[in-house]
Amino acid sequence: MPSPATESIYNVLLCVEFEEDVLAHYKDMLGTARDTDARLVVSKSGKIFARRFEIALPTGETVKYNLIMAMGGKDAVEIAADLHEQGDEIVVGFFELRETEEGTGHAGAIQEIRKHFPKITCGVVAPYSEAHFRRIADLFGSPDEWLYFDGNLITRPELEHTIGNLIASFRHTREREEALERVEAGRQGMHQILAGSPDLLKMQNLDELYGTIVRQAAALAGSGGALLALKNDEGFKWAAGCGRFDCDEDSKIQLRRSQAEAYFQRALEEGKRQEFPYGTVIPMTIQGKKIGVLYLDEAAQALRDAQILDVFASQAAFAVENSRLRLEIDAKKAIEHELDLAARIQRSLVPSTFPDFPGMSVYGLMQSAKEIGGDYYDCIVRDHDGQPELVLAVGDVAGKGVPAGLIMTEVRSFIRSQVRITPNLKEILVSVAALVKDDLLASPGKFLSLLLSRWRSGEDHMKFCSAGHEHILHWRADKKNTKAHRSGGVVMGVPIAALEKAITVKGLRYAPGDVVLFFTDGVTEALNPQGEMFKLERLVALLDETAELPVRDMVETILSGLGEWMAGAYQRDDITLLAVKIEG
């Protein structure tokens, strides 16, 4: 059976004793071969009849399932073996059997069936005994995988309700496993990018760089070939290829240039990946400048976390542009431009537009220091029970330079993946901390503060969870003043157990007209020419003065006020502001 994401018909095995009273009890569920909604499954051992039903899951979704009858444990095991051999799948098993010395009862039947279908979720009906309960429990790795009913012959409503819950549990488990596989693929991809960064950024001529890019792209995507095409005034220069797209041998390029360049141009114009039958095109841009495209064969379309290709394309675009500049200017200017371009990449990964979210307006900005920094913010809209939900993230990687910027890029990818997996803010922070732990430990003195907040239209409060980030400022329209709330928690970089214990999900109530402001320590620790810090009190005063302005004007006015305080003094750290204004 295909995965639940693409198929909504599930096989449910109902295994009962071949006895008159039991069969009479379940007869309206089992049906016969003459039923119009029954389907015939031909197996090695004979004919299996399955009756099709519809059921509403706890999520509200209606799905179909085939109810297959088995008479006793031995029959159930034979049916499972036959269905497995013909490529079908059983997702739910419901058992009402007697325990026998021959081992054909619950434990024996379930154990044999799970050899074919290890992910099956099961319901067991039997008079309770601790020994029997333990035998069943030992077969499963999690309580989510099975249910135990004390008694005999449960009612049809109870049976249908249980089947719905077991199908929902099976779907949830599989979706979570697939999501975790995507996250792990993303983590491995990010580590692969980080490991390959020195080869992209080292001093080398352009031909060497182009070859490095296509080889790394093909390895990252698991493709049989990769092609780098750079934009120029005439169209595209086919700069380098590997595998089936080796540019040294035109016969290996298995696509027509005119056809390919149409896809290349579309990818650059739309600024996103283009999939077509022969492969995948990823645009390479930096701060709106069109560098070129990476073209990979069709194998890249099977990559679990396709965003990894986008991150690599940004890295490759930076490397290409950086190398071009290094050829044009002297060593000192090359270093300055390298840092500037890296900062542009960092800024390109934060939102340039903000969601039109019901009931509130959002605006943020980040002003990078001269050296590469590690500030980060993001606005992610996700679905919650059919309604839009806004997740805001603000973070700061300690330290400067390329390592801090790369860790920030990694964190962005992980957060965006984790937000799709779980609605729980604490679980997201703990998962991200575990995923970046090795990278933080690899750089002495590196740590990461991170704050997540969740907003829903029509509610009067938001939830937030912090890993050692700055205060949250809340300007109340009714009182015309600002209150600072400690966000709490400890920074990422400490042992995971200590972090998990220290962070909690909290709430903050608001009313129409209120403003909530998030920031990084580059704001409060900014210095004026006399070496004095700006501090939290001055930021609170600025918010009090500007809170009634439109949200964009408010944020930009606060930044302008900070600039006046600094009066041209050296900016030591990135400055990030992210504000939400509740519409009245």
Image: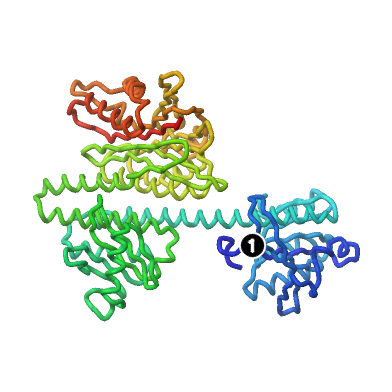
Q: In what element is the residue under mark 1?
A: loop
Mark 1 Cα within 10 Å, few/some/many (few <14, many 20+)?
some
Up-down relation of residue 89 to residue 390 (above or below): below
* Residue at the image point whose x is 40% and y is 46% from the top: 438
What's under tag 1, amino acid-wise?
Pro
Which residue ends up furthest to the left in the rendered image?
Answer: 330
* Residue at the image point whose x is 21% and y is 45% from the top: 339
The N terminus: image quadrant: bottom right
**Observer-nearest residue: 27 or 322?**
27
Which residue ends up furthest to the right in the rendered image?
Answer: 20
x and y, in percent, of residue 239 in the image: 21, 67
Up-down relation of residue 78 to residue 62 (above or below): below
Query: Could you tell whether 114 is left or right of 238 in the image?
Result: right
**Which picture quadrant has residue 16?**
bottom right
**Observer-nearest residue: 432 or 346?**
346
Q: So how many labels did they put on this image?
A: 1
**Observer-nearest residue: 445 or 125?**
125
Up-down relation of residue 564 to residue 386 (above or below): above
x and y, in percent, of residue 190 in the image: 37, 53
x and y, in percent, of residue 395 in the image: 38, 38
User: Would you name the residue on which mark 1 appears?
Assistant: 118
**Observer-nearest residue: 76 or 452?**
452
x and y, in percent, of residue 109 in the image: 75, 64
**Which picture quadrant has residue 209?**
bottom left
What color scheme is it?
rainbow
**Which picture quadrant has residue 42?**
bottom right
